[in-house]
Image (spheres, helix red, strand yellow):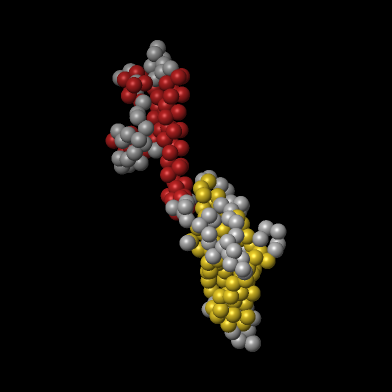
Amino acid sequence: MTAASVMSPSTATLPIGSQVPSATSSASTGTSGTLTEANFLTLLTTQLENQDPLNPQSPSDFAAELAQFSTASGVQTLNQTLGSGGGVQAAGLIGKSVAVSGNALVLGSGGSAQGAFSLSAAAKDVRVTITNAQGQLVNVIDLGAMGSGYQNFTWNGQNAGGAAQSAGTYSYSISATPASSAATVTATPYSVVPVTSVVMGGASGPMLDLGGGIAPVALSAVQQVF
């Protein structure tokens, strides 16, 4: 058997994603399977060792094989990012609103804004104070008695006199009166903002781009989805 008959350049080149011949697969994994990075490197090394010295494979052919495998590897990496890195979950949030750390109220063209907060204990009265970008008082909403945990509210986009306010980003604060004189209540506000896009591949995983001028946040920063 000549060196060329062991593995010629034509037989060593396999389409990416094709099934590895049983002989090769048995030698590397013991079972048949798709072409992996280890399989590819084994085939490439065998090509180099057993090519016909009188008719060696062109370096450009090797480069083409490497480019094909690199493309397939990139697609596999993207699939892993989408599947195991929370990418699919993050992409599903586009167009929805999420609660993240902050106290912004994003008033859209629809004339209303949503806010959220958490209470450390039950309160007999909860009030939301809304201010504009200049720090001027816009309105105060009395939510009444509320239990502990996550709560949310909707602002109708009007000031105390009933006049509609311009679309934009406002701020709010929460004041809560304890239901019991012996208790204390801590109110933690959250910004409820729309997710406009998702950026993959960050060090902290998928990053959510948010509307209302709010800085991007990691998927793990989401407290609630609306």
Residue in the picture at 39% in, 22% down: 50
Relative vertical location of residue 198 with respect to residue 190 in this rendering, above or below: above
Extreme bottom residue here?
Answer: 181
What percent of the width, then of the height, locates residue 82? Answer: 45, 47
Residue 20, percent from left and from top: 32, 34
In the rendered image, which quarter is residue 185 located in?
A: bottom right
Residue 225 coordinates in the image, percent (x, y): 48, 61
Query: Compared with residue 201, is residue 144 higher up or lower down, i.e. above or below?
Result: below
Measuring 29% from the left and 35% from the top, which residue is drawn there? 22
Position of 215 with respect to 28 (left or right) is right
Q: Residue at x 51, y 48 (%)?
A: 197
Q: Quadrant of the N terminus?
A: top left
Position of 122 with respect to 132 (left or right) is left
Q: Nearer the viewer, residue 138 or 14?
A: 138
Exactly how many numbered labels are in the figure? Answer: 0
Q: Is residue 201 visible?
A: yes
> Could you tell me if residue 38 is visible in this image?
no
- For the residue pair 152 and 37, the one nearer the viewer reads as 152
Query: What's the residue at 56%, 47% (across, down)?
Result: 202
Height in image: 98 above or below 187?
above
Q: Nearer the viewer, residue 133 or 160?
A: 160
Pick out the residue farthest to the top.
54
- Residue 153 in the image: x percent, y percent? 53, 69
Above or below, comparing residue 153 to residue 181 in the picture: above
Residue extending furthest toward the left: 22
Residue sitting nearer the eye, 24 or 219: 219
